[in-house]
Amino acid sequence: MVFSWVVWPSRVARDEGFMKATADPRMRPAFNAMPIDGMRMIFGGFAVKLDV
């Protein structure tokens, strides 16, 4: 599992990017099941892979 976030330069850029991302069919889940196991996430810990 990967956790990340985006820092947008402005609210207008954020709104436009969000609309494009939600309209892209590749961003829609292929199934309705949970993609992660919450218990494994809680007890598994985290490791930083990239810090920019």
Image (cartoon, helix red, strand yellow):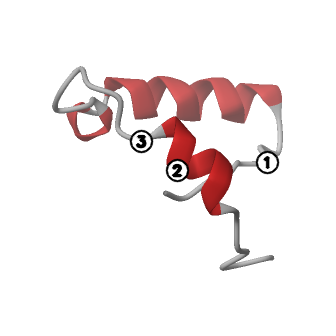
Image position, residue 24 (x, y; %): 29, 33
C-beta proximity under 8 Å, tags 3 and 2? yes
Type of the residue with mark 2: Arg
Left/right placement of residue 34 relative to residue 40 reads left
Q: Position of residue 6 (x, y in %)?
A: 71, 48
The residue that mark 1 highlights is 7
- Tag in front: 1 or 2: 2
Q: Residue at x 61, y 60 (%)?
A: 44
Front residue (pair 34, 23): 34
Residue closest to the eye, 27 or 47: 47
Above-or-below relation of 33 to 9: above
Gap between marks 3 and 1, in whole Å? 25 Å
Residue at 83 percent across and 35 percent down: it is 10
- Figure quadrant of residue 15: top right
Mark with earlier residue (1, 2):
1
In contact (CB < 8 Å): disc 1 and disc 2: no
Precedes in sequence: disc 3 or disc 1: 1
**Which residue corresponds to mark 3?**
36
Of the two numbered discs 3 and 1 in the rendering, the one whose residue sits closer to the viewer:
3
- Under mark 3, the amino acid is Ile
Quarter of the image for the C terminus: give it: bottom right
List x then y, in percent, for residue 3: 62, 53
Q: Secondary structure at mark 2?
A: helix
Q: Which residue is mark 2?
A: 40
Q: Residues within 10 Å of mark 3 (few under 14, many from 20)?
A: few
